[in-house]
Image: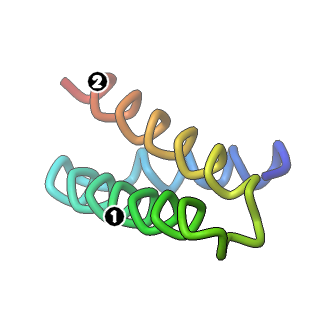
Amino acid sequence: MKLKEIKEFVAELRGLSQEELAQKESELKKELFDLRFQAAAGQLDQTARLNEVKKQIARVKTVQAENK
């Protein structure tokens, strides 16, 4: 992700409620699980997507902590 995309993603996250943030986190965790499964099976084409999803999960958790 580019810096502009990251800023837009975080701005979007800050506009969400705690329940919506929790839902977004669970969606990203499911995607991460699927990506790891594909990587283990040798079917993952975009290996950089693994790190990107991990960072998005961290951003969601950061925004959740800010709201508390």
Give the residue drawn at x 28%, y 52%: 21
Q: Which residue is mark 2?
A: 65
At label 2, which amino acid type do we have?
Ala
7 left or right of 10? right
Mark 1 vs 2, N-terminal side: 1
The part of the image, by quadrant, that contains residue 63 is top left
> In front here: 63 or 15?
63
Q: Which mark is residue 30?
A: 1
Give the residue drawn at x 74%, y 57%: 47
Q: Which mark is residue 14?
A: none
- Kindly state the secondary structure of the residue where label 2 is placed: helix
10 left or right of 15? right
Q: Residues within 10 Å of mark 1 (few under 14, many from 20)?
A: few
* Quadrant placement of the C terminus: top left
The part of the image, by quadrant, that contains residue 57 is top left
Describe the colour scheme in one phrase. Answer: rainbow
**Furthest-front residue in view?**
41
The part of the image, by quadrant, that contains residue 14 is top left
Where's residue 20, x and y in %? 23, 60
> In front here: 39 or 1?
39
49 left or right of 62? right
Q: Are marks 1 and 2 in contact (CB under 8 Å)?
A: no
- Kindly state the secondary structure of the residue where label 1 is placed: helix
Where's residue 26, x and y in %? 26, 58
Where's residue 36, x and y in %? 50, 57
Disc 1 and disc 2: Cα gap in Å? 21 Å
Nearer the camera: disc 1 or disc 2: 1
> In front here: 20 or 29?
29
At label 1, which amino acid type do we have?
Lys
Where's residue 37, x and y in %? 46, 65
